[in-house]
Image (cartoon, grey):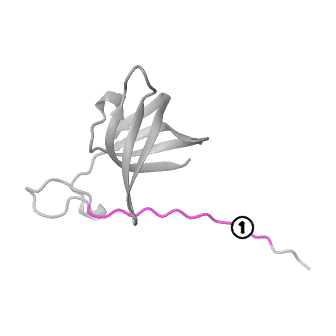
Amino acid sequence: MPTIWGHVELVVNQPESPPSLVLNKRTTFGTCRTECIVGMGVRILKGFEPLSLDEIRSGDFVIATITEHAGWLEAERIEVIEFRHDSVMGVGEGDADQPNQLLHSTRVECNVVWHREQAG
């Protein structure tokens, strides 16, 4: 399933429009602003704890599993990521009195195409 990830800019949960999330995703070209509709029955988790859409806050880092439709994105699963002190992951290093922060994160995706050679 395709995923998007980034910091939440805005949670829209109004009765007159479908609920949605606006994410700011950092790329090598700058910041990409992406909006996705929150689907019916979406699973929202923080660790193993279920959350409601109203519990997601601006600035939270989320990973959303999405479905692509013609012209719009629909989130099917949203995971709120909480960074802790973990030097192995490169997160939270530094002075103990400084807030936790993401120091470096890399995501690599690749597509593998298998070719069958014909005996001949």
Image check: 101 left or right of 52? left
Q: Residue furthest right?
A: 120
Percent across and percent down for residue 18 are 46, 27
Q: Residues within 10 Å of mark 1 (few under 14, many from 20)?
A: few
Which residues make up the magenta segment?
103-116
User: Magenta stretch: dominant SS?
Assistant: loop
Percent across and percent down for residue 66 are 52, 42
Image check: 5 left or right of 91? right
Q: Disc 1 marks which residue?
A: 114
- Rendered residue at 40%/19% (across/down): 15
- Rendered residue at 32%/38% (across/down): 10
Percent across and percent down for residue 65 are 49, 43
Q: Quick one: 42 or 21, which is closer to the camera?
A: 21
Q: Is residue 73 above or below residue 99?
A: above
Q: Please state which amino acid type lies under the numbered disc 1.
A: Trp
Q: Is residue 48 above or below residue 114?
A: above
Q: Quick one: 36 or 106, which is closer to the camera?
A: 36
Does the magenta run of residues contain 66? no
Q: Is residue 12 above or below residue 91?
A: above
Total marks placed: 1
- Rendered residue at 29%/31% (across/down): 55
Q: Is residue 65 above or below residue 40?
A: below
